[in-house]
Structure formats: C-alpha cells, structure tokens
Image (cartoon, rainbow, N blue to C red):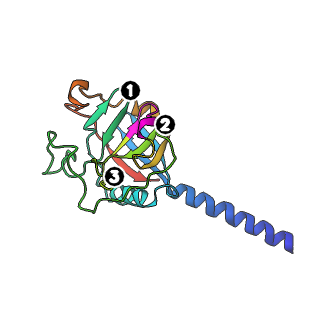
C-alpha cells in the first residue's frame, strides 16, 4: 500500500512540475518562424508576470524591433509607439514608450547575459523597466546585475539572428524594421 501511495505521489509531482514548466514557455513568432522561450519566474517573478500579461493580451503582436545592434542585441517591446498596427505607431519615437502599466522595480540576479538571454530594457533608473526587452546575440557580461534577466531562447536562436540589423552609427535604429508577429504562452 505504501509503495502504491509513493508511486502516486511521484507521478503527481512529475505531472505538476511538467505543468509548471509548460506555464513558463512562450512562443515568439517572427517572420522566419517560431522561437521557443523559457521564462524565469523564480528569478524575476514580477517581470515574468508583466511579460505574460502583455503577451497574452496581444500587446506585443506587430511590435517592431526598433533597435538592433549586430553582435550585441535586438530590442523590441515598445507597445505604445512601436506597435505597427496602432494609431500611436511612430518609428521615430519607438523605444521611448511602454505600456499603461506602472514601471517595475528591478529584479537583478546572478543570471548572466549570455547568447539568447532575454532582459528588460530600462532608462538610467534601475526601476524603470516596463514593456521593452532585448535578446542578446552574444554574451554581454557588462550588463550582468544591472538589467533584469527574465528568460532565454530554448529553440530558434538562428531565427533571432535573422532579425534586420540597424544603423550602428545611429545606436542601432532600424529603418523598415522586422516585427513580432505574435508572442503567446504555449
């Protein structure tokens, strides 16, 4: 009887862990295909909650990658001025906006900014992250413990590598930028 109960408990925990793991998987649809992303709810719970809320509400759909620097990162997530199908869309102002939700307090951690890391963009104020984020093309250790890491690319980094690059002499600003087709929970 104890063995049966132990097996049932093991199966329950395995199933529960699988559900929790699936809950933190997102699909970022780009022009060239789907990018599978894992969110780090245990590292940055408030940032993950915000990303899920905006993504599942369709706020990231059609948002441009307004700043893309070769060998560094691709930045997106301006749901105010960077949403290409919105009346407020203004490519010149993309990167200056956010959502209508309040800014987030930083959740810096020891998770490094490696290739494929997703991290929140912010102003000089550490507690100013809102909706914008970036994906690192290469390791960027100079960002460690200064920006909130909230996830990583699990599959499809080759698709992220295909995002149109910006003008290096203009801080990576992109004319005719690529955009997020959709960003949703699995």
Q: Which residue is mark 3?
A: 126
Alpha-carbon neighbours of circle 1 within 10 Å: few (<14), some, or many (≥20)?
A: some
- Classify mark 3: residues with Cα within 10 Å, few (<14), some (14-19) or many (20+): some
List x then y, in percent, for residue 119. 40, 45
Label annotation for residue 41? none
Who comes first in sequence, dot 3 or dot 1?
1
Which circle marks residue 71 in the picture? Answer: 1
Q: What separation in Å lies between label 3 and label 2 (alpha carbons)?
A: 20 Å
- Disc 3 on helix, strand or loop? loop
Is residue 4 in the magenta section?
no
Looking at the image, which residue is at 23% across and 31% down? 174
Q: Which residue is mark 2?
A: 114
Label total for image: 3
Which stretch appears magenta? 135-143
What secondary structure is marked by label 1? loop
Residue at (20%, 32%) from the top-left corner? 176
């Amino acid at each position: 009887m104890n063995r049966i109960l132990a097996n049932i408990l093991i199966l329950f925990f395995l199933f529960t862990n699988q559900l929790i793991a699936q809950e933190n998987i997102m699909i970022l649809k780009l022009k060239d295909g789907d990018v599978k992303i894992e969110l780090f709810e245990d590292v940055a719970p408030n940032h993950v909650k915000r990303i899920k809320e905006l993504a599942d509400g369709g706020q990231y759909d059609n948002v441009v990658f307004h700043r893309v620097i070769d060998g560094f990162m691709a930045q997106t997530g301006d749901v105010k001025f960077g949403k290409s199908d919105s009346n407020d869309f203004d490519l010149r102002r993309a990167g200056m906006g956010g959502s209508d939700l309040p800014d987030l307090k930083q959740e810096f951690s020891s998770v490094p900014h490696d290739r494929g890391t997703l991290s929140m963009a912010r102003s000089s104020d550490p507690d100013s992250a809102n909706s914008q984020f970036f994906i690192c093309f290469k390791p960027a250790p100079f960002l460690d413990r200064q920006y909130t890491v909230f996830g990583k690319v699990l599959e499809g980094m080759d698709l992220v590598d295909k995002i149109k690059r910006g003008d290096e002499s203009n801080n990576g600003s992109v004319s005719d930028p690529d955009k997020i087709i959709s960003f949703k929970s699995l």
